[in-house]
Image (cartoon, coloured by chain):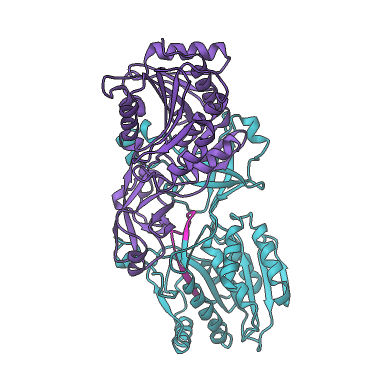
Amino acid sequence: MLKNVLKELCALDGVSGYEDDVRKYIEEKAAKYADEMTVDPIGNLIIFKKGKKRPKRPVMICAHMDEVGFLVNRITEDGLIRAAAVGGIDPRVLIGRRLKVGPKKLPGIISLKAIHLTTAGEREKSPALSELYVDIGASSRGEAEAKVSLGDQITFDSEPLELGDKCLKAKAIDDRVGCAVMLEMLKDVPAYDTYFVFDTNEEIGSRGATVAAQRIEPGVALIIEGTTACDMPGVPGHMQSTRQRRGAAFSIVDGGTVYSRTLREKVIAAADKAGVKWQYRESANGSTDSGVIHLAGSGALTVGLSAPVRYIHSACCMVHLPDVEEVLKAAKLFIKEAGDLRV
Amino acid sequence: MELKDKIKRLTNAYGVSGDERREISPIAAELMKPYVDKVEIDEFGNVIGYKKCGVKNAPKLLLAAHIDQIGFVITEITDEGFLRFAPIGGVDSRMLLGSELTVLTQKGPITGVVSSVPPHLQKPGDSSKSVKIQDMTLDIGMTGAQARRAVRVGDYAAFAHDTIDLLGDRVCGKAMDDRACFVCVLHALELLKDAPLAMDIIAVGTTKEEVGAHGAGSVTYRYRPEYAIAIDVGHARTPDVSPDRVPCELGKGPMIAIGSNSRPNFARRVMEIARAKEIPYQLEVCPSSTGTDAMKMQIVESGCCTLVISLPLKYMHSPVEVLSMSDVKNVGRLLAELAKSFDGRL
């Protein structure tokens, strides 16, 4: 079931470069559906799945396995940890949060001195990551070093939790939601032969997708993402980007790509015919793996398809699960519509 | 039950100031029952345990640790299904973005996430500006109509999450302030089980401390103790405060306050006891207000001799307050040794 797979994926830890646990999980789940499985030198899991027909040019679908987080950068005399960010994180969502530190998943926390000790002026400013530290309860460097090493990954500690009306709260929904959708897609025989790429290092600049696309040289590619839904009270409509409960979001343009209008419109026409709920991603900000994929080899036509996710890059991302079902439906249509394109 | 399990039981439960009777008061009363002659919950939610010494007209010593916690009250349910909220007690708004709160609805607890705008949509400089609580919303994953059925304006909310163990003997969670001190009092009562006493002890889990120590005031008025000790949490140093501002440290023992609200002669007596019994302690100089139940207790009726003993705590009023179990034990021991040797004469 898509929901359960998504929950299990979000419970795993894998900041950019440390995706091993996520990949292992996906390999196990995908093994029986895959025709070929390859792990490339930078950790991408590339699964080739035979379809009903051979496409004119290779079809690639991808989602990234990595999540934003931190690495242990320094351990202080007092046994506290200074962390280096992996990917874009607003330091304001870190204060008061719980974290998992290192391979032993040691609990750690980030906090501030008590409010009683602050001035009104201090409370107006939120500290930068460089001013914050992770407390694992150690009282000396030695006590901390016995349990933690420099370079260990640190992730948010946020148990996946269903809440409200069919919503899931978890860390790393960006982009385990894409991974979950692809795992579900693998169960069907696709309309055309397809490369499913679970890639790495997206959050620090799409390095996994770069080499995967250079290897596959796709003619058409679909990038499945968890994207910003900023549909909160007080945010003007033109800033909301996507909205929950409105289905799968198609990208038009972002910081890395002007997406293929031809291909998008073809998929949207099929989505309309099939009654798939969809919306545009009404923002040109951000970027996805498409930025490198559409430039690989002689170039590719790309479609960006996303689940609207609130509070991405925080401990508590939120997705409306029926939206994810719509992403799955639209992604399946993509293969059907894109496979016969001579790019 | 181990002391740590008692702390977990109490801090995993909810009881924001004014809402104690529903959940936390009965739990506190249940935990206190084995150690006192009688325990009752009054109309304000104060949990009051009596331990008589057997001497007629014996002087009374009141031990107060508050069982309420800081939190929030829901002030509005928006058409989009989000909740607006106001703080109860001192909450640093910088702890809230992207955090989970538990809303205590009529039908039970539900979880919500405090909304935040993702980095992609922020303007340069935004990430260093704090957001005011009145500008925040709580996302409970519902539509407006659903939210209005589930939540009422006036429902309470508090930091979510259960208490966890950190390295060593460090424990981390919400509402350590001041339920960990209630456990210190329980520990003292346990140590006093068969000890001969010269004073009646009134052990109280007080309410509404975070909004003005109202519970302690009312209990003190009722029982007119000659002596009253507020057992509360005290600031333990973190790297973002100077030793001049916060001289005390975690794991170094009870903090004995000295100053106008924590009577110097009473404090000196307790220090003598600590030294005699080899209990580590730290001195906390409090020239005026201690911001504890002692503020209220000191000026009830014709007055009461008060003292403040504090449990060192890091990150007070955050969702991740950190204490050391050795301090919990030592605060309990110090209270017990004081009660054993004190006859009401300083």
Name the residue rendered at 53%, 54% in the picture: A158
Q: Nearer the viewer, residue A47 or A247?
A: A247
Residue at the outermost front position: B56
Q: Is residue B238 visible?
A: no
Q: Is residue B241 above or below residue B176?
A: above
Which residue is at the front of the view, B57 or B129? B57
Position of the N terminus of chain B by quadrant: top right
Residue A24 quadrant: bottom right
Horizontally, residue B316 falls left or right of residue B2, namely left
| Residue A309: in magenta span | yes
Measured along the vertical axis of the image, is residue B148 above or below residue B19?
A: below
* Residue B206 on image: x %, y %: 39, 34
* Residue B204 x, y percent position in the rendering: 42, 32
Residue lying at the far left in this picture: please name it. B301
The residue closer to the viewer here, A343 or A319, is: A319
**Residue drawn at point x = 61 percent, y = 83 percent:** A57
Of residues B192 and B12, the one nearer the viewer is: B192
What color was chain A assigned in the picture? cyan
Answer above or below: position of A304 versus B5: below
- What hue does chain B carry in this figure? purple
- The span picked out in magenta is A303-317
Quarter occupied by the C terminus of chain B = top left
Q: Is residue B130 magenta?
A: no
Residue A81: horizontal and vertical position, in percent? 56, 38
- Horizontal and vertical percent position of residue B148: 32, 65
Relative side of B289 to B253, left or right: left
Residue A51 visible to an observer of this rendering: yes
Residue at 56%, 18% in the rendered image: B279
Q: Main secondary structure of the magenta part?
A: strand
Q: How many numbered circles does the render carry?
A: 0
